[in-house]
Image: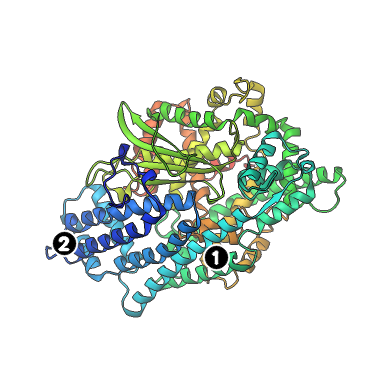
Amino acid sequence: MTNPLLADWTTPFEIAPFDAISDDDFAPAFEVALAEHKAEIAAIADNPEAPNFANTIEAMEVAGGALDKVLSVFFSVAGAESNPARQELQREFSPKLAAHGAEISSNKALFGRIATVWEARDSLDLSAEQQRVLMLTHRGFVRGGAALEGDADARMKEIKSRLAVLGTEFTQNLLADERDWFMELAEDDLEGLPAFVVDAARAAGEEKSAGGPVVTLSRSLIVPFLQFSPRRDLREKAFAAWAARGANGGETDNRGIAAETLALREERAKLLGYDCFADFKLETEMAKTPAAVRELLMAVWEPAKARAEADGAVLTEMMHADGINGDLEPWDWRYYAEKRRKAEHDLDEAALKPYLQLERMIEASFACATRLFGLEFKELDVPLYHEDCRAWEVTRDGDHVAVFIGDYFARGGKRSGAWCSAMRGQAKFPKVQGPVVINVCNFAKGDPALLSYDDARTLFHEFGHALHQMLSNVTYESVSGTSVARDFVELPSQLYEHWLEVPEVLAEYATHAETGAPMPEAMLKKVLGAANFDQGFATVEYVASALVDLAFHEGDAPADPMAKQTEVLASLGMPRAITMRHATPQFAHVFAGDGYSSGYYSYMWSEVMDADAFEAFEEAGSPFDAATAKALETHILSTGGTVEADELYKRFRGRLPGVEALLKGRGLAA
């Protein structure tokens, strides 16, 4: 029988036929598709015709279609619905893919053809997008080591292969620690917890077959437990397990992986002629240099640290008033911050949550996209990889735009966090194809599912990424959607978060789970008034992580990353009751792959832009101003990576932003 991964998909909108695919299909399909891509690359490299844009660059755009199909399905399920078979396949595929990529990037005949087209670019009558694709292709090969010879070439291949293995191991170790640990709760231990936390703990206990409620290391459960549990001993135990992920010794310990990864990245950069990995990595980003990144982060660090220290003093007094002497600890901060928020803003998370139903927040995110961009959403009945997943067809003026898939609930086989990916990107070459976009989150299940305000913000954030994919309108898939500079890619997602805070959006969609009543105006004002509450804490934990990431890659690779982490935090005067948002052994952004390595700062770089970009709507007099929304789509959301990011932003806003709007938005301005 034909392998369903390799067959033509006759499903609606050519969505992967998940109901026909088994784990046994992946390995044989991968081998066939890999061999096919190798043959396609060889045909391009060995083409006897003189190289031109069509037979070299466009041919490379088309090559690997079968492999892309197989991998888009595999990596979607490997991240969101992992099992031992898929983990083993991931360990098997990763080095093969790395070797395959290194083989392509070091193919001298292929690079010779690309270089020939590049050198003749001014005489080829290429469109602006074609010139951009040619430049990115040539640059990517040079940065991938195509110009290396002999031992350097061979060593680069070894480094890439090893890094792929290490990234997979890091991810799987972290998943194992998060999956395997849980803390059983007796009925007395539930005292003081709001109903939504109790319900989530009971649901987690059922999933773990624990016979009662449990706390797991899913952020959607452990964070509210740390916020609400009056049991300091249980908070300390849960926090210790959360902080120890990836650093528990034994087979799942990530500290050695981090050290080896950093050493290999430094060696890779030096093979290519760079002083350090950060110089190499940032060259193609908006920031360009480590110095520019550090300047931004330090401009935010000082006011954030001052705010956090002042807040910490208040929380310490509250703890002492409870009869607990000594210092405020990391497992105390969220608990006393929540009590303070309730006291100062009269905002009770437990009272707020029933107004933030998952279903209504999905509707809100869709409704804003309808008002801003004219998109319509119709739910589809199609087989997907898990029963929790849902799909919608996205249209505009009756025309198909995209398929959007939502996978919202936490479960044991899903890696932590939230992310957006395209199972198929938008393109017009070699044929017109609409994107298939997926948002994956880790919200606690419930009936109905209720979100924290932070959860709701995450939902809007990931949907902002999805809009970047769905509204893409370019010719070549390699520059479509989110194929942009890393420190630009978070702009659409972080900008979209602002619409959650638009009062008329909350007034319409924040309705009570039991009564259906809209959020009372007084509560709405409290929610918006408390939007910047505890921003000192949030900013410090984030910026500390970004500065540690930068320090790891800015100079010589540290032999002991944990010692380097300690050194950096000490030099910053890190408040003792706040930890890094992602400590090194669980810093998947940085060590699960190269994606955010020396690039974790990019969320804040993008926030500088998103704060300024939303001001464009405010200046126009409405968060739904049609002309501003059109400009946003025209200059940013539809253009993918066809133009340099700073130029795109200037086309939208007329100038580049400063840090002032960010500090104002976080309530950190003097």
Q: Quadrant of the C terminus?
A: top right
Residue 400, percent from left and from top: 31, 32
**Residue type, numbered disc 2:** Pro
Residue 223, percent from left and from top: 66, 45
Taking the spot 37% from the left edge, 46% from the top edge, the residue there is 423
Taking the view exactly as shown, the residue that stands out farthest to the front is 1
Circle 2 sits on which residue?
A: 51
Residue 338, percent from left and from top: 72, 39
- Who is closer to the viewer here, 535 or 619? 535
Q: Is residue 450 left or right of residue 8?
A: right
Is 434 situated above or below 542? above
Q: Secondary structure at mark 2?
A: loop
- Who is closer to the viewer here, 407 or 337? 407
Taking the spot 33% from the left edge, 29% from the top edge, the residue there is 396
Is 423 situated above or below 256? above
Taking the spot 51% from the left edge, 44% from the top edge, the residue there is 607
- Who is closer to the viewer here, 375 or 513? 513
Q: Is residue 618 in sight in this rendering?
A: no
Marker count (numbered): 2
Where residue 451 sits, quadrant-wise, is top right
Check contact, mark 1 vs mark 2: CB within 8 A.
no
Residue 44, percent from left and from top: 20, 62
Choose the circle earlier in sequence order: 1 or 2.
2
Rendered image coloring scheme: rainbow
Q: Is residue 42 in sight in this rendering?
A: yes
- Who is closer to the viewer here, 588 or 606? 588
**Residue type, numbered disc 1:** Phe
Categorize mark 2 by other alpha carbons within 10 Å: few (<14), some (14-19), many (20+): some
Categorize mark 1 by other alpha carbons within 10 Å: few (<14), some (14-19), many (20+): many
Where residue 237 sits, quadrant-wise, is bottom right
Circle 1 sits on which residue?
A: 552
> How far is mark 1 from mark 2, CA to CA?
41 Å
